[in-house]
Amino acid sequence: MPRKYEFIEHTADLGFKVYGASPEKLFTHAAEAFFEALVALESVKERIERSIKVEADGLDNLMVRWLSELLYLYDTEMLVFKSFQVKRIEDNHLEANARGEVLDPARHEIKTGIKAVTYHKLYVKERRGGWEAQVILDI
């Protein structure tokens, strides 16, 4: 199976590159990388399912909006997600389901604190029959 994402070096921040055969897979893998940076995914159980809808102009802005919404759910409701299904991306609109649970400090070790999803060095582009994105997180 081709790689879904890889973490990249970035001074004082955390970055990752994401890959996918379609925009939907790309955004799914970005969410997985985001939560892998936050908490060990193997410790998260799929007890809660959330439907998420976001809108933004262009795929770059949509990526920031998508990951920022996930960060918002973590910050406000302490939700950690393990699996994602991006069902549809069209007309600057994303619809997805995320599965996970409420953070349990006894079982979930927080790897890093994420303050924000940034536009620094951000890109989302089609490449060689697939898609690639780069995201830098403010930690």
Image (cartoon, rainbow, N blue to C red):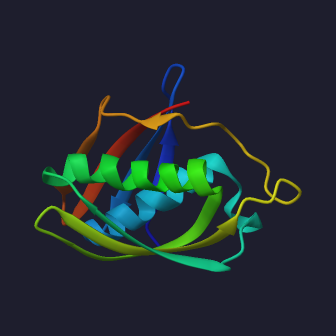
* Residue 69 at x, y percent in the picture: 42, 54
**Picture residue at 68% right of the left edge, 52% below the top:** 39
Residue 71 vertical position relative to residue 19 in the rendered view, above or below: above
Residue 101 vertical position relative to residue 112 in the rendered view, above or below: below
Q: Quadrant of residue 26?
A: bottom left
**Picture residue at 64% right of the left edge, 36% below the top:** 113
Residue 73 vertical position relative to residue 47 in the rendered view, above or below: above
Horizontal arrangement in the rendering, residue 12 relative to residue 41 (left or right): left
Q: Residue furthest right?
A: 106
* Residue 62 at x, y percent in the picture: 25, 53
What is the count of numbered marks? 0
Horizontal arrangement in the rendering, residue 71 relative to residue 66 (left or right): right
Q: Quadrant of the C terminus?
A: top right
- In this view, the residue in front, 104 or 85, is 104
Horizontal arrangement in the rendering, residue 86 relative to residue 94 (left or right): right
* Residue 96 at x, y percent in the picture: 37, 74
**Picture residue at 73% right of the left edge, 46% below the top:** 110
* Residue 17 at x, y percent in the picture: 40, 47
Q: Residue furthest left?
A: 91
**Picture residue at 26% right of the left edge, 67% below the top:** 94
Q: Residue furthest top?
A: 11
